Amino acid sequence: MEIAVTAWRFGTGGKASELARQAVIAESMGFHSFWLPENHFTGPTAIPAPLMLLAGVAAQTERIGLGTTSLLLPIRHPIATAEEVAVLDRMSGGRVILGIGRGFQPAMFTAFDVPVADKRKLFKAHLTTMLAAWRGEPVAFHDGEPVLLAPLPVQQPHPPIWVAAFGPLALKQAGSLELPYLASPMETESVLVENYNTHRAALAEPNPVVPLMRTVFVSKDRATLSRVRDQLGTETRRSPAKDVDDWAIVGDPEQVAARIQSYRASTGMTHLIARGRISGVEEDEQISSLELLLAIARDA
């Protein structure tokens, strides 16, 4: 099982240097990959252009994978996006993992003048265009001559693509595209089992990649764990989950190891993306948690 990590601080005022610093730490610790989400119009925590920020991260790192938890295709031009992904893959030496999605914020679709009802259709159409461009197929013809994407990605025919999906139709669409399903960090384990079953049923062939994103915090200190649980409890009230343990993995090393084994058994998880954005957790506490997580993974 591979262990990845998201940025644990997002309120960086758009400074790639702060995100790069976190990625350098994650790389030195031995994490598989470093992930950024995409979100718009959320004030100081907004990340509207994750590929641009990951380019800054790429310049400061050498080995760690660079992932987007959900690059939103319906609001983007597919050829421009295909070019940007290819450039990032080139400049990073082939380290991109492209998580893609449709988006769900009504205000975002209004701002980008994209009808919400068209998001699934646009997602598929844009992805189809991007895949063809990466294969070297003409993106257009001008004066009878083919127009070809350049440069192409290092990873051929394209970087790994994982699909963030919500709801049965989106899950079936991800399966019909023969792409891995990247699960939400807020859904319960029982819902995830149903989702993975729906996704697998839509696959023509089994897919060996089963990524899962969970909020993770590990500590040997009971007071620290209690404080983190209390903080996460405020997020639980805004989710369909009834308890922190329904959607987060929080505990001492033995408890966390047991929860990871449970997820592996129930979902077939092959990649755990540890979401570390927890309000009130200091960086030394976050790094200590990540060190304990990696030790658990090595012993698994």
Image (spheres, rainbow, N blue to C red):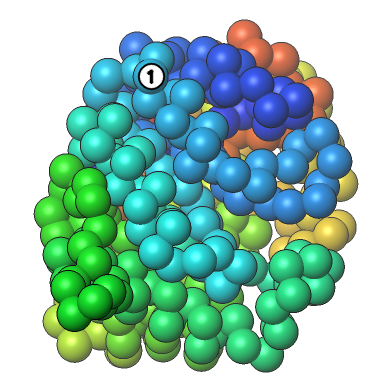
Image: 209 above or below 140: above
Residue behind mark 1:
59
| Residue located at (51% from left, 88% from top) | 121
State the residue at coordinates (52%, 13%): 21
What is the x, y in percent for residue 281?
73, 22
Q: Is residue 125 left or right of residue 186?
A: left
Residue 292, image x, y percentages: 45, 21
Residue type, mark 1 in image? Ala
Task: Give residue 60's quadrant in the image.
Answer: top left
In the image, residue 86 above or below residue 253: below
Query: Residue at (34%, 12%) from the top-left corner?
Result: 28
Depth check: 157 or 232 in front?
157
- As displayed, is residue 232 above or below residue 180? above
Which residue occupies the foreground of this view, 17 or 227?
A: 17
Q: Is residue 77 above or below residue 278?
A: below
Residue 232 is left or right of residue 297, and the answer is right
